[in-house]
Image (cartoon, rainbow, N blue to C red):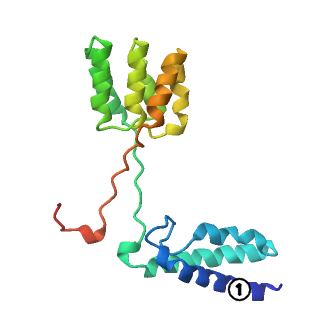
Amino acid sequence: MRLSLWVPIAGVIMAAALTGHAKEASTQAMPHPFLPMDQLRAFSPQLPSQEVRQKYATLLDALLVQAIAHCPRNLQPTPQVRPRPATNAEMVDIDNSLRTVKTDAGKLMVLKVAARNHHFSVEQVRQLVSQIKSMEIRTQSLVSLHGRVIDGKRFHALLYLIPNPDHQMQLFKATETSPSPPPAERPPSPSANGATAD
């Protein structure tokens, strides 16, 4: 099929998708509340040539820009701010607190308190937990910090800190049902300026 025919077809497909999914905007997690971009992009391999696919991708991008521009403010996607790991200065403060405590139980309490206000990378958790000698308390520390690790997919790299299989199973069971890291704070929307807190 000629490119001149595929272009309007692609436009019809996108317009139909826009209409068909409008009512589901409040329940579906998509880059734009009305546009199922993943489904629309999945159609691209069925197009007859690379030239047509590039044109289709350009149309999708243009449609997304226009849809966001005309979307009501309260339906526009809110940018997510990814949690950051503790800064070097914050890590120094926590490390100093750990060194002032003589018992492993005290160090565990330091980490529990620090976890209330900080997120950590896997490497930072390794640096902190390795200061604890008791394998049982190391296990408890890893459980306490698990929900505050920003790169949780690498958490398995910490298992060597507790080589005992029983401790590893204890950690696995405890973190299997542990809550996910709390969502990051969202930047205030322009419409919230001047609003009072509840």
Is 168 left or right of 148, judged from the image as shown?
right
Amino acid at pointer 1: Ile
Residue occupied by mark 1? 9
Residue sitting at x 36%, y 36%: 87
Is 185 left or right of 31, judged from the image as shown?
left
Is 61 left or right of 149, judged from the image as shown?
right
Q: Is residue 38 visible?
A: yes
Q: Is residue 163 visible?
A: no
Name the residue nearer the viewer: 46 or 187: 46
User: Residue 156: image x %, image y %?
Assistant: 55, 30
Q: Secondary structure at mark 1?
A: helix
User: Residue 103: image x %, image y %?
Assistant: 29, 11
Quarter holding the N terminus is bottom right
Looking at the rendering, which quadrant does residue 44 occupy?
bottom right
Q: Is residue 94 above or below residue 36?
A: above
Looking at the rendering, which quadrant does residue 14 occupy?
bottom right
User: Residue 134: image x %, image y %?
Assistant: 40, 12
Residue sitting at x 43%, y 33%: 146
Looking at the rendering, which quadrant does residue 174 occupy?
top left
Quarter holding the C terminus is bottom left
Q: Is residue 196 above or below residue 66?
A: above
Residue sitting at x 54%, y 74%: 35
Residue sitting at x 78%, y 84%: 3
